[in-house]
Image (cartoon, rainbow, N blue to C red):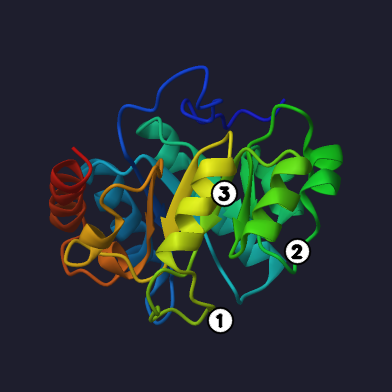
Amino acid sequence: MINCKIDMIIKKGTVKILNKKLYFITDSTDIDNQTFLNKVEQACRGGIDILQLREKSGSDKDMLDLAFKVKEITDRYNIPFIIDDRIDIAKIAGCGVHLGQNDIPVKYARQILGKDAVIGATAKTVEQAENALEQGANYLGVGAIYPTTTKVITIRTSISTLNDICSLSDVPVFAIGGLNSSNIDILKGSDIAGICVVSAIMKSENPHDATIKLREKMNAVFA
């Protein structure tokens, strides 16, 4: 059985989501493995709620080795662990998976990973969100709200579209794309479950303090 469950992957009509959640997505570009793992641990100590390992290069073996090392850290802090794109790595590592629009559809990932797996999906439009929900996605990542500095190609999503997706979704919706403590005010009033960040933590010289600062800002904006 997949052992990576997210406690707030729930029907919004059944249990009210009281706390906004901080979803951290990694980026190992231009840093060595030890520095990368140190940043992951600092983010976990700082208070992230979910971690997604997103690697766009490297061998399958390297990816699997890194997944096990990251999972060892997230398990110590009891933080749910998600793999980006790679259903095979997720199945071997025993964790959830996040799928983009060009990845294997959610319904087929469910057949591979099982009914208890956490499967998230990217949605940039209402139509994409509806499709992911029909296929059984456990949560949605919606954006990019702002341009990003990662190497992932992004398409902007308006706040109005984000709100439309929130209104139709019965699973948590996370805003993503260029978000940090200086610009998340734009999301005030949105019915999101939380935000996804990459550079706000990964590019910080002190990921622990950056995570704490971001959580404090989230508490103020989404109070």
Q: Whole-percent x and y of residue 221?
A: 18, 48
Q: Whole-percent x and y of residue 97?
A: 64, 48
SS label for mark 1: loop
- The amino acid marked with disc number 3 is Leu
In the image, residue 41 sits, relative to residue 176, either above or below, namely above
Residue drawn at the location 80% of the way across and 39% of the way down: 110
Between 169 and 113, the one lying in front of the other is 169
Q: Which mark is residue 153?
A: 1
Callout 2: few (<14), some (14-19), or many (20+) C-alpha neighbours within 10 Å? some
Q: Whole-percent x and y of residue 208?
A: 18, 52
Q: Which residue is mark 2?
A: 103
**Side of 136 where 98 appears, left or right:** left
Question: Which mark is first along the chain, 1 or 3?
Answer: 3
Q: Whole-percent x and y of residue 204?
A: 21, 69
Question: Which mark is first along the chain, 2 or 1?
Answer: 2
Q: Are marks 3 and 1 in contact (CB under 8 Å)?
A: no
Q: Which residue is mark 3?
A: 140
SS label for mark 3: strand
- Between the residue at mark 1 and the residue at mark 2, the CA separation in whole angstroms equals 14 Å
- Between the residue at mark 3 and the residue at mark 1, the CA separation in whole angstroms equals 18 Å
Q: Are marks 1 and 2 in contact (CB under 8 Å)?
A: no
Residue drawn at the location 56% of the way across and 25% of the way down: 11
- The amino acid marked with disc number 1 is Ile
- Between the residue at mark 2 and the residue at mark 3, the CA separation in whole angstroms equals 14 Å
Which corner quadrant holds the N terminus? top right
